[in-house]
Amino acid sequence: AQKVTQAQTEISVVEKEDVTLDCVYETRDTTYYLFWYKQPPSGELVFLIRRNSFDEQNEISGRYSWNFQKSTSSFNFTITASQVVDSAVYFCALSEAGNQFYFGTGTSLTVIP
Amino acid sequence: EAGVAQSPRYKIIEKRQSVAFWCNPISGHATLYWYQQILGQGPKLLIQFQNNGVVDDSQLPKDRFSAERLKGVDSTLKIQPAKLEDSAVYLCASSLEGQLPYEQYFGPGTRLTVT
């Protein structure tokens, strides 16, 4: 079974639109960590955020925000006022207590100017 | 601060040949990871080192893949013999050591094509 599910394979938005990338995870551990990474066309994965399972506060960083809901096992990522530079593949990842890392299959975001 | 270095960037080999990839992590990062990323998929962890020791290699196909990290710094991943399905990007990442899973810093990857 997939530990991390990113149901949206590809999304296209017009510049300045808001977009939300969904991430649903599965774990039996009570302590775990969730991550988002960005993979631009250059290929190098870039860390965006880490969240631990005990901190359900939403986080905002500039145009980026994250909504963590344990009740639905979701960790969604919203980009406000999208820009062309946001075009990339975005990966959600889960780390369980044993430090195993599981990445989702990614969501390819295209921002059209 | 220098990032994670990997070489070569591209490699084309025929099936049944051998290939090796090299990774130099960020200075001071005790944890090193090798991932396989097949086109259109997310990275899959192959092996994780903490200093010299292996933390997890449960998804490493040990009949053909091997990895080592001598002196707790550089690491080499080898495939022998290669199969067509090994065509992928091989990513190396490193992170700080600690109880928390710290964010990983990724290298540019090595794109392997097996023909």
Image (cartoon, rainbow, N blue to C red):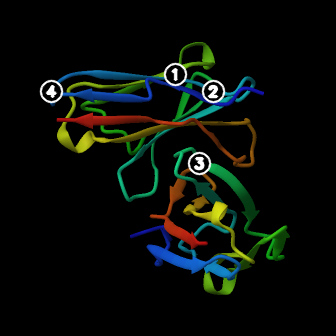
In this picture, residue B6 sits left or right of residue A67: left
Q: CA distance from mark 4 to mark 2?
A: 29 Å
Q: Circle 3 sits in a helix, a strand or a loop, which is it? A: loop
Q: Percent from the top left, x then y, of residue B104? A: 66, 44
Q: Are marks 4 and 2 in contact (CB under 8 Å)?
A: no
Q: Position of residue A17 (x, y in %)?
A: 68, 82
At label 1, the amino acid type is: Ser
Q: Nearer the viewer, mark 2 or mark 3?
A: 3
**Within-10-Å neighbours for mark 2: few <14, some 14–19, many 20+:** many
Tag 4: Cα neighbours inside 10 Å, few (<14), some, or many (≥20)? Answer: some
**Picture coordinates of residue A41, whole percent (x, y):** 52, 51
Q: CA distance from mark 2 to mark 3?
A: 15 Å
Q: Disc 1 on helix, strand or loop? A: strand
Residue carrying label 1 = B75
Residue A15 in which image quadrant: bottom right
Disc number placed over residue A45 in the picture, else none: 3
User: Where is residue A89 drawn, in percent x and y?
Assistant: 53, 61
User: At 83% from the left edge and 72% from the top edge, which residue is drawn?
Assistant: A59
Q: Chain of mark 4?
A: B
| Residue found at the very far bottom of the displayed protein | A71
